[in-house]
Image (cartoon, helix red, strand yellow):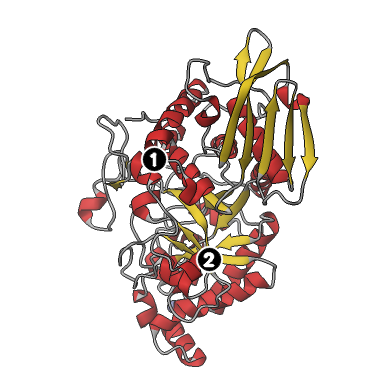
Amino acid sequence: MKKLAGKSLVIVAALTAASASAALQIVPAPRKAVEGEGTFVCTGDVVAQVKFESDTAVPKEGYRLSVAKDGIKIVSSDEAGRFYALETLKQLAAKEGKDGVKVPCVEIEDSPRYSWRGLHLDECRHFFGKETVKSILDLMARYKLNRFHWHLTEDQGWRVDVPGYPDLVKYGAVRSASPRHGEKAYTGTKEDAAKLNGVRYGPYYYTEADLKEIVAYAAARHIQVVPEIELPGHVYAALAAYPQFACCPENLSSREPRLVWGIEKDVLCLGNDEAIKFMENVVDWVCKVFPGDVVHIGGDECPQIRWQSCPKCQARIKKEGLGDHNGLQPWITRHFVKFLADRGKRTLGWDEYLLGDIPKSAMGMSWRESRSGAGHELVSGAAAATRGHDVVMTPCSYCYLDYGQGLGDDPFLYIGGKVTLERCYSFDPCAGVPDDAKSHILGGQGNNWTEYTWNEYDLAWKVWPRMLALSEVFWLGEAKPGFADFKKRAAVQRSWLVSHGVNCAPIE
Ligand SMILES: [Zn+2]
């Protein structure tokens, strides 16, 4: 993706007069648009021509945009609404002559259906870096997405330099090998070991200054960064730095992250007070670096096999009256829900972490549609919402952008599955949720797991245009105008994306 930074006020649109209804060429479609006669024309910066007004009756993040021949007016109740009105204006505007800009006359009344309109990026399996992240944030703003879920720690890599713990990146941010391009390797068998490429990967990580730079860049675009620090599973890269925090330190003798993909059986020893103190220190630092109100603690795919034979974990179970190993994860989840609440934050985690007795204040991220992953019982989004948890819906068969997109010809690799553009557009975050629990569905998110995604071109291909469809779902919900209508507008957006250096996949 070409860097779009610093160009936010420059209007460069690919719209042409020959296209159909101008107001309908934007994505997400506006909730209500009435086209007028003629166009507004000016030279230079069109934003400088806009008159802004405030009206508390306009919904949160919503706006009214009036474009008339003699002027442009934006009315909103908050800064975000004003920001989104300008993003709409940028999509509507087209070049006129050498220095001119023209905007079709239109009256738009718009506001989002969902408050959580997210995009996720796994930087652990592969690392993309600040400039790619900024490009993603630019495009998120254009399509009115407002949560960037940043997956920063994993079995295969630890990507943040936490003060006081230099070994985290020394050992956790570099792999001596990864699965070869095109090979699928998930286990520790000899057969999978033979699929490794022997190429050093890293060290790749973000410093505190990098993270603060991204947080500020996102905030300027009304995007909250939601950091994810995985626990108690998917922590193998951290255990490479601190083997003493594992139930079986001898399993970490290589002192490096997991080299193949898949789920690691060595997880945090929950019987070890020092291991828990370590995680508290990391999470406490995360709370200070990321000012948003939500911290994601993972909680997915945590095998319990080590806990079953670990004397420390067994002692914890006995001391806390947890029954058996099944009681350990809910226990640590409750611990961190309180730890984060004490710091003014809400806790978010993948659906498995809601198993057991978990406070209603814990938010869930629903990804599974069956008992997949490490085999934990399914907690569906509908079930979690019915129990009173706020939920972000990211079901893999609609929202996983590392699944194949069903193109006739596709040079890129996928983890499997099939999520077509139309499938994304058909997503209803509230499907199957009882009416009285629907208020707990905060919205949805597109997820980029990156085992089979190597660089920004590969990533952009998988994100766009599917994220256009999801952005419209999250903005309009039940009011979306339909796939045929969307497809025409998405084609216009694809032209814009391609002309701005974004490797958007075709719309077939
Ligand atoms: Zn243990």
Residue 460 locus on image (x, y percent): 44, 34
Q: Is the residue 464 above or below the residue 364 in the image?
A: above
Q: Is the residue 291 above or below the residue 265 in the image?
A: above
Q: Does mark 1's beta carbon lie closer than 8 Å to ligand 1?
A: no
Outermost residue, top direction? 98
> What residue is rendered at 63% in x and 67% in y?
281
> What residue is rendered at 27% in x and 57% in y?
187
Q: Is the residue 375 above or below the residue 289 in the image?
A: below
> In the rendered image, which quarter is residue 433 located in?
bottom left
Q: Report how far apart the C-alphas of labels 1 and 2 lie in the structure.
A: 33 Å
Foreground pick, 468 / 284: 468
Foreground pick, 349 / 279: 349
Residue 198 in view:
no
Q: Which mark is residue 215?
A: none
Q: Is residue 368 left or right of residue 220?
A: left
Residue type highlighted by circle 1: Thr
Residue 124 locus on image (x, y percent): 46, 50
Foreground pick, 206 / 19: 19
Give the secondary structure at mark 2. Answer: helix
Q: Which residue is mark 1?
A: 453
Outermost residue, left direction? 191
Rate crowding at label 1 as few (under 14), some (14 to 19) or many (20 or more) other CA atoms within 10 Å: many
Taking the image in four quarters, ligand 1 sits in the one at bottom left
- Confirm or deny contact between disc 1 and disc 2 (CB under 8 A): no
Foreground pick, 196 / 216: 216
Residue type highlighted by circle 2: His
Q: Which residue is mark 2?
A: 440
Residue 28 locus on image (x, y percent): 52, 38
Q: Is the residue 416 above or below the residue 244 in the image?
A: above
Mark 1 and mark 2 lie on one chain; the one further toward the N terminus is: 2
Residue 13 locus on image (x, y percent): 57, 21
